Image (cartoon, helix red, strand yellow):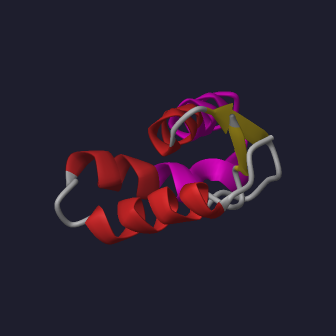
Amino acid sequence: MKTMTCRQLGGPCDLAHRGETADDVITAQDRHLKDAVRSGDADHQEARDAMKGRWRHPKQSLGWYRDMKQAFADLPED
């Protein structure tokens, strides 16, 4: 297990997401951003819009995805 924060994934807060893979924490971040915006947290709106864009245009977002996978790989195990 490794941990990345919302901020490390491009968001505005330090909520920790834990997972076995980078995809686990990216998916958790997506859920977190959806939930935060749905509850009226305007601070997360910009990050949520960016995440939505990445899901809609995955080929254009490969750089971000590779960067997050590498950042996850570089982290120590929890």
Residue 11: give x, y in percent of width and height.
65, 57
Q: Position of residue 64 (x, y in %)?
A: 40, 66
Q: Residue at x 32, y 54 (%)?
A: 54
**Residue furthest front in the image:** 77
Q: Point out the stretch of residues depicted in magenta.
A: 29-49
Residue 35 is inside the magenta segment: yes
| Picture residue at 33% right of the left edge, 71% below the top | 63
| The C terminus sits in image quarter | top right
Above or below, comparing residue 21 to residue 39 in the picture: below
In the displayed structure image, the side of residue 26 where residue 61 appears, left or right:
left
Question: Dividing the picture into quarters, in which one does residue 16 lie?
Answer: top right
Who's the residue at 72% across and 54% down the image? Answer: 43
Q: Is residue 11 magenta?
A: no
Which residue is nearer to you in this view: 24 or 30?
24
Q: Is residue 58 left or right of residue 26?
A: left
In the shown orientation, is residue 57 left or right of residue 48? left
- Main SS class of the magenta portion in the image: helix
Residue 60 point in image, percent of width and height:
21, 66
Please give the count of numbered marks on the rendered protein: 0
Which image quarter is the N terminus in?
Answer: top right
At 38% from the left and 59% from the top, the residue drawn is 65
Camera-side residue of 50 and 29: 29
